[in-house]
Amino acid sequence: MKMARSENILEQILAELGEIKQILLLNSREVLKNELNEIASTEERKQIWGLLDGLTSTADISKKVGVSLRTVQMFAFQLEEKEFVITEKRGYPKRRMDYIPSDWQLKEVSRVG
């Protein structure tokens, strides 16, 4: 019985953290969008941003977007310097926040898990 209660409390905490995350994202959306527009200045860079899910390799992203592997690597490095992405597994960068401006209208997007 005690285990079920602990799981229920953890689920409540997770739900509340999810709500807090959404509120923070909504409050900072305009600033984030401006920063992203500045660094993701081309359609290719916007597409790359949309595919940085931590599961897709930079090689696969380069093929999907139609740019060189080096282009994807350099952009990911720039994003990492600005702390927009993390790379837990070499060659698989992941967006720190699952945010893609709605007006970018990307043809392919990967949701960060």
Image (cartoon, grey):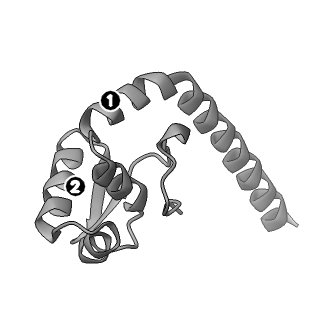
Which quadrant of the figure has residue 82?
top left
- 31 with respect to 67 (left or right): right
Q: Position of residue 66 (x, y in %)?
A: 27, 69
Q: Is residue 48 above or below residue 55?
A: above
For label 1, the residue is: 35
Q: Is residue 17 left or right of residue 64?
A: right
Q: Earlier in the sequence, mark 2 or mark 1?
A: 1
Specify the label residue 87 is tagged with: none
Give the alpha-carbon distance from disc 2 to disc 1, as whole Å: 15 Å
Q: Residue furthest right?
A: 1
Please give the name of the residue rendered at 27% of the width and 44% of the height, measured from the top-left corner: 42
Query: Which residue is at 41% across, 23% downward?
Result: 31
On the image, the x and y values in percent for residue 74 come to: 13, 56
Three-letter amino acid code of the residue under disc 2: Ala
Q: Is residue 10 above or below residue 13?
A: below
SS under mark 2? helix
Q: Residues within 10 Å of mark 1 (few under 14, many from 20)?
A: few
Q: Which residue is mark 2?
A: 76
In front: 41, or 91? 41
The x and y percentages for residue 48 are 33, 57
Question: Which residue occupies the foreground of this view, 75 or 5?
Answer: 75
* SS state under label 1: helix
Residue 5 picture location, percent across and down? 83, 58
- The answer to whether residue 65 is left or right of residue 77 is right
Residue drawn at x 50%, y 49% is: 98
Closer to the camera in the image, 81 or 35 = 35
Horizontally, residue 113 falls left or right of residue 66, namely: right
